[in-house]
Image (cartoon, rainbow, N blue to C red):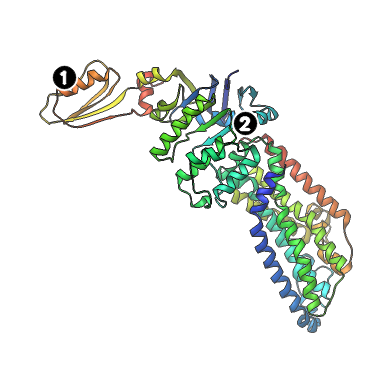
């Protein structure tokens, strides 16, 4: 049985097709990245999976239970954790009181262990929390009942880089324990660090389903080189270089080839400044899946 | 069971304590004011006679200011219990769902393994904290205050007045709940709750003793009258049952709407 089985799922808001005939499967025990630019329909899918809204057409199952049937879904939810990017917590209670409340609704056999990794100031009111502390409460409540499946919507926004790394490490551990994680994001770099497979959604449609390695080969890097102004930049071109744009004292391109070749190529120039970064997701789409 | 009610009810404790304290202070103020009003009683009756008929119907009814029952029921209960508390619970109920939708709290609740109907009913029941809280404390304050100034009233009527206010307030809360499941913005649902209950109150008062008296029959205020209970000792038990049925109907419709809605 798959952890999540989405079949022909559509959700329309009037004329807007937020999700349009989505079909994909999330296997048990994998970390599945659900990647797409903002407004692509990721949250819509998640809200359908959790039964917050009902599909216009098609359906999905989570842990084998149909999301259109409330009784079935309730059974599944006992084994599901949910972590939104900006969890709606009660501002007037302390972190501890909030976790007690969530525990009364679904259990908390792992709370202590989780609080060692993610340690918000539990005895303070949540309204005094930083964004990161709120997110840590969110993480603890999502995992504390030891669910088989955790559905996360842009979960690491608000976490500082160290906590983010701890969280990624934690997710890998969960995968080792056989848990399934569904992880939506609009940042390729975030997904690549932990996910096994990635589904890419754009304008409500599933563009591709890939193993993360294949995606990374396609993704490439955005490179921006500043040289001495008199340098001849014409040679800075070749295999793996696409979308090249030259400017006064430098050149910018997306590189998808072998990094050793790039380093040798760059070594021939007197470089003043060099930036190599993750390409924006929109660019990845443009280059590899076409503009339409 | 009742985890949501327990949690939300606890969060209403402080507000209920403040409300109860304020009402107690007001009650004592009214009670201690009574002797001097009673002395100048005749003038006061004249003043009441000069009020517009609808106003008299809404706030005074058949009560006499020169008896302690009449004075209390008009100056305190007709105004505070029938109108202000009714508005207060409708306003509070307006936030039950809409405020949680706005803040994202509802998502966290719906993600847990409990049904939507249970979420809604348990949230609604948390309003019993203020409703029961004020009704448990105030009669004792009023009674003790009256004893302190050497007056007394029938304790059974006083008890009945508070007991029968519970179905009334639950209906007002039901009206607020209906708006709360329909509207996404809490402030609109809350103001709508106030507007609806106040509008129904007006409809009841202006239609009384006219050819359109039947119009006011839709208003919960028609079925709960502090003046009748305290001044005349007549209890509208059938009215209370009707109010209870109205409250249940509001909750039932709200559950049906809540279960079908997308969030």
Q: Quadrant of the C terminus of chain A?
A: top left
Judging depth in this view, the residue of A245 and A257 nearest the camera is A257
Q: Can residue A86 be seen in the rendering of this structure?
A: no
The chain ID associated with circle 2 is A
Q: Is residue B190 above or below residue B54?
A: above
Discs 1 and 2 lie in a common subunit? yes
Whether residue B96 sits left or right of residue B49 in the image: it is left
**Dot 2 surroundings within 10 Å: few (below 14), some, or many (20 or more)?**
many
Q: Residue at x 49, y 52 (%)?
A: A128
Q: Assign a secondary structure to mark 1.
A: helix
**Dot 1 surroundings within 10 Å: few (below 14), some, or many (20 or more)?**
few
Q: Quadrant of the N terminus of chain A?
A: top right
Q: Residue B152, image x and y in percent?
A: 84, 75
Q: Is residue A157 above or below residue A214?
A: below
Q: Quadrant of the rendered structure where residue A263 is?
A: top left
Q: Residue B69, image x and y in percent?
A: 83, 72
What is the CA distance from the residue labelled 1 to the residue labelled 2? 56 Å
Q: Which residue is mark 2?
A: A51
Q: Residue at x 26, y 27 (%)?
A: A223
Q: Assign a secondary structure to mark 2.
A: loop
Q: Residue B75, image x and y in percent?
A: 75, 71
Q: Which residue is mark 1?
A: A235
Q: Can residue A286 be seen in the rendering of this structure?
A: yes
Q: Quadrant of the rendered structure where residue B181 is?
A: top right
Judging depth in this view, the residue of B44 and A165 nearest the camera is A165
Q: Residue at x 39, y 23 (%)?
A: A285
The chain ID associated with circle 1 is A
């Amino acid at each position: 049985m798959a952890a999540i089985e989405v079949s022909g799922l559509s959700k329309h808001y009037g004329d807007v097709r937020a999700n349009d005939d989505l079909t994909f499967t999330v296997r048990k025990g994998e970390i599945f990245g659900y990647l797409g630019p903002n407004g692509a329909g990721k949250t819509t899918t998640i809200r359908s999976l959790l039964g917050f809204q009902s599909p216009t057409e098609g359906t999905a199952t989570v842990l084998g239970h149909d999301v259109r049937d409330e009784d079935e879904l309730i059974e599944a939810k006992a084994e599901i954790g949910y972590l939104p990017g900006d969890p709606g917590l009660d501002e007037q209670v302390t972190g501890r009181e909030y976790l007690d409340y969530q525990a009364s609704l679904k259990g908390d056999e792992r709370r202590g262990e989780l609080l060692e990794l993610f340690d918000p100031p539990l005895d303070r009111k949540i309204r005094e929390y930083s964004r990161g502390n709120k997110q840590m409460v969110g993480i603890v409540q999502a995992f504390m009942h030891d669910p088989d499946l955790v559905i996360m919507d842009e979960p690491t926004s608000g976490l500082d880089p160290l906590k983010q790394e701890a969280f990624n490490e934690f997710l890998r551990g969960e995968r080792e324990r056989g848990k399934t994680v569904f992880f939506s994001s609009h940042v390729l770099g975030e997904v690549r660090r932990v996910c096994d497979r990635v589904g890419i959604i754009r304008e409500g449609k599933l563009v591709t389903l890939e193993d993360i390695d294949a995606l990374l080969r396609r993704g490439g890097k955005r490179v921006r080189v500043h040289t001495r102004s008199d340098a001849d930049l014409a040679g800075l071109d070749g295999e793996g270089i696409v979308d090249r744009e030259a400017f006064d004292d430098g050149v910018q391109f997306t590189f998808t080839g072998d990094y050793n070749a790039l380093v040798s190529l760059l070594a021939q120039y007197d470089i003043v400044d060099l930036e190599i970064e993750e390409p924006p997701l929109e660019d990845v789409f443009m280059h590899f899946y076409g503009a339409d | 069971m009742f985890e949501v009610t327990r949690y939300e009810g606890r969060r209403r404790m402080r507000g209920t304590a403040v409300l109860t304290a304020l009402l107690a202070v007001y009650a004592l103020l009214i009670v201690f004011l009574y002797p001097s009003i009673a002395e100048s009683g005749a003038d006061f009756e004249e003043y009441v006679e000069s009020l517009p008929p609808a106003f008299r119907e809404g706030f005074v009814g058949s009560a006499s200011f020169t008896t302690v029952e009449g004075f209390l029921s008009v100056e305190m209960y007709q105004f505070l219990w029938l109108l202000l508390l009714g508005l207060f619970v409708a306003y509070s109920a307006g936030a039950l769902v809409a405020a949680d939708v706005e803040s994202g709290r509802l998502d966290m609740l719906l993600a847990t393994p409990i049904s939507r109907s249970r979420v809604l009913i348990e949230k609604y029941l948390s309003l019993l904290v203020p409703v029961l809280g004020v009704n448990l404390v105030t009669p004792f304050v009023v009674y003790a205050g009256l004893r302190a100034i050497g007056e007394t009233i029938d304790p059974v009527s006083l008890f009945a007045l508070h007991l029968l206010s519970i179905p009334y307030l639950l209906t007002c809360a039901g009206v607020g709940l209906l708006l709360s499941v329909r509207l996404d913005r809490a402030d609109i649902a809350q103001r709508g709750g106030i507007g609806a209950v106040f509008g129904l109150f007006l409809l009841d008062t202006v239609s009384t003793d006219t050819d359109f008296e039947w119009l006011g029959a839709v208003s919960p205020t028609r079925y709960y009258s502090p003046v009748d209970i305290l001044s005349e000792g007549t209890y509208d038990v059938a009215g209370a049952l009707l109010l209870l049925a109205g409250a249940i109907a509001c909750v039932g419709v709200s559950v049906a709407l809540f279960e079908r809605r997308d969030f």
